[in-house]
Image (cartoon, rainbow, N blue to C red):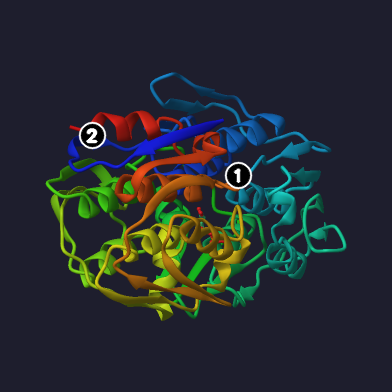
Amino acid sequence: MHTTVERTDRLRGALRMPGDKSVAHRALILGALARGMQTIEGLPASEDVASTASCLRSLGCRVDVDAGGRARISSRVRLNGEELFAGNSGTTARLIAGLVAGRDFVCTIDGDESLRRRPMGRIAEPLALMGADVETSPAGTLPMRIRGGGLTAIEYRPPVASAQVKSAVLIAGLRAEGDTAVVERVPTRDHTENLLAAMGAVVDRSPGRVQVSGGAELRAIHVRVPGDISSAAFFIAAAVLCPDSEVRIVGAGVNPTRTGILEALGAMGADVSLENVETSAGEPIADIVARSSALRGTDVAGPVIPRVIDELPLLAVVATQAEGTTTVRDAAELRHKESDRISAIVENLRLVGADIEELEDGFVVRGPTRLVGGRVSSLGDHRIAMAMAVAGLRAGGETTIDGSEAVGVSYPGFFRDLESLVA
Ligand code: S3P
């Protein structure tokens, strides 16, 4: 499927985002381990979250989701010997691996072609250190067979900054003998520890370290999933880039481990502000208001990277319209996402006339440039499709995005919502 985006001079309106994908995966998975019936409100209709629900059903849980995004998890995991299919979702594969490792189960986890290319050694290693028997393909990828149970606690220092690795270890740690800790050099998103604490796990946190005690039972709660800031980022960037624009995103999650994009845009001179800030189940939520802005280049590197990792392709698009040079470094992890996001964004932005140079661990963009319309490809990656749609709003003529159906992985209604803002 392809979608065409036209140059646009004015975006106006208010939108509520689909629920945060990261929070939704965790609300489902931890709900499947809890005593009682976990209820969730604001579950996104994304394919990735559906993959988590489907893995849990394969594990014998009853997961009911209605059309309004309300979900109930009414029985706990119990089945053994299952084949679990994680689709395109790295979070599903890695967090479910942590769950299975803690049980006396044998399961095989597999995924689609893109997920089969992504590294799984990073979770196989700590889970094996805890005592699970984990076998990946020789390349360290899916399919991965796990025989779990009989775990002992470890203190783990992940060699890569990854919330998925941290979460897999903590979820396995719920079933380990003793206290399992993860020590991070650079902080990553902390939704797992927030939810574990809200559900009654024994969680001990200090800067750079989180510990969970084995054996404590989780208590089911009601989780209100905030709007996904990683989805909101596309409209925030679009409003900042288009003249005569103002867009309000209502009820977005603004957990500080996720707001690196707001900081980077702020450093570029973007007019973005937060209103109506509140907190729900440990997660801060706010309205985000973005307006047309004159932008300058910036440098993004170091500890902020995990807090902006999913928004970096979009930042490259924004940088094409900023005065001066924008450099992103320390982001080699981008090469291990749904696509190699460094080469994907460089290739696509060059096709529409941007001045962008590829680095091993990032990119350099020189702006501002006049983008030209043309034909680009999502390369099967939802965030590349949406980033190029934003580029298309500023390019002359029409921009056609091949493989635009990829947006369904996180945001099936993306193009409809974008259309609704075109005044
Ligand atoms: C996620 C963590 C990040 C992010 C991904 C979702 C999560 O990946 O890129 O989209 O929900 O934990 P890593 O933790 O592997 O960097």
Q: Amino acid at mark 1?
A: Gly
* Mark count: 2
Q: Would residue 143 be seen by someone viewing this image from the given angle?
A: yes
Q: Would residue 281 be seen by someone viewing this image from the given angle?
A: no
Residue located beneath label 1 in the image: 380
Q: Residue at x 45, y 70 (%)?
A: 356
- Residue 262 x, y percent position in the rendering: 27, 62
Q: Amino acid at mark 2?
A: Leu
Q: Which mark is residue 235?
A: none
Q: Residue at x 67, y 39 (%)?
A: 87
- Residue 129 placement, left or right of 262: right
Residue located beneath label 2 in the image: 421
- Residue 128 x, y percent position in the rendering: 77, 66
Q: Residue at x 43, y 71 (%)?
A: 305
Q: Residue at x 32, y 59 (%)?
A: 370
Q: Secondary structure at mark 2?
A: helix
Q: Nearer the viewer, residue 5 or 186?
A: 5
